[in-house]
Amino acid sequence: MTELHEAVAVGDYDLVKEILRKGRCDPNHKDVDWNDRTPLHWAAAKGQSEMIKLLVAHGARPCLRSDAGWTPAHFAAESGRLGVLRTLHSLHAAMDAEDLFGDTPRRLAEIYGHKECVKFLETAEVESRNYLRTAAMKGIPVDQRDEDWELKKEEFKRNSSCARQNYKTSVQKKNRKKMGKR
């Protein structure tokens, strides 16, 4: 965990501001010991909207994902942080990104019973998609893709496909042995 991760996790706005101003840490650094969380993930989970604005102003990318594919919006939705969801939406962060298991921030808010977040995300998802279409038509660049995570996701899919195939073959062999066939 970097100095910046720690300062964000404890909510020390002034220290975060100083670290960013002096360029001591990369605001997009993924902490492998904490499931590839960035400082922005921590700020979202902790409900720190002002911290999110500060981090984004210093180059933090809201599209970056944890090892399971969670964006800052996923962390905010899980924690019921409506203010953070509103802040992320105002910064044009993806509100409908699916994680590794197909869950969106809205689905997480549903699972954890955060009804106001669910209601907000229903509208925010549509607005987010509309913004992307408009930006594409106008040629406005939008940062919505975490290239590193996309590679990990493909590797996971390949490995889980192999694991399913090996499991299936193993079960078939056991069944043949039970039936006296080899």
Image (cartoon, grey):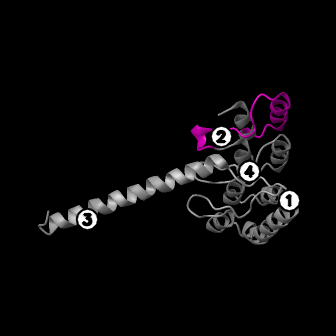
Q: Neighbour class for label 2 at 10 Å: few (<14), some, many (≥20)?
A: many
Q: Which residue is mark 1?
A: 139
> Which residue is located at x 74 percent, y 55 percent?
144
Q: Earlier in the sequence, mark 2 or mark 4?
A: 2
> Which residue is located at x 71 percent, y 30 percent?
3
Could you tell me which secondary element the residue under label 1 belongs to? loop
Q: Indicate the quadrant where residue 19 lies.
A: top right
Q: Earlier in the sequence, mark 4 or mark 3?
A: 4
Whole-percent x and y of residue 27?
75, 38
Camera-near label (2 vs 3) is: 3
Q: CA distance from mark 2 to mark 4?
A: 15 Å
Could you tell me which secondary element the residue under label 4 belongs to? helix
> Range of the magenta residues?
10-36
Could you tell me which secondary element the residue under label 2 belongs to? loop
Q: CA distance from mark 1 to mark 2?
A: 30 Å
Q: CA distance from mark 2 to mark 3?
A: 41 Å
Q: Earlier in the sequence, mark 4 or mark 1?
A: 4
> Which residue is located at x 70 percent, y 60 percent?
77
Q: Look at the image and say whether residue 20 sits in the magenta stretch.
A: yes
Q: Which residue is mark 2?
A: 30
Q: Earlier in the sequence, mark 2 or mark 3?
A: 2
Amino acid tagged 4 = Ala
Camera-near label (4 vs 3) is: 3
Residue in the foreground of this view, choosing between 117 and 172 = 172
Q: Which residue is mark 3?
A: 172
Q: Are marks 1 and 2 in contact (CB under 8 Å)?
A: no
Q: CA distance from mark 3 to mark 1?
A: 53 Å
Q: CA distance from mark 4 to mark 3?
A: 46 Å
Q: Which residue is mark 4?
A: 44
Q: Locate the C terminus by quadrant.
A: bottom left
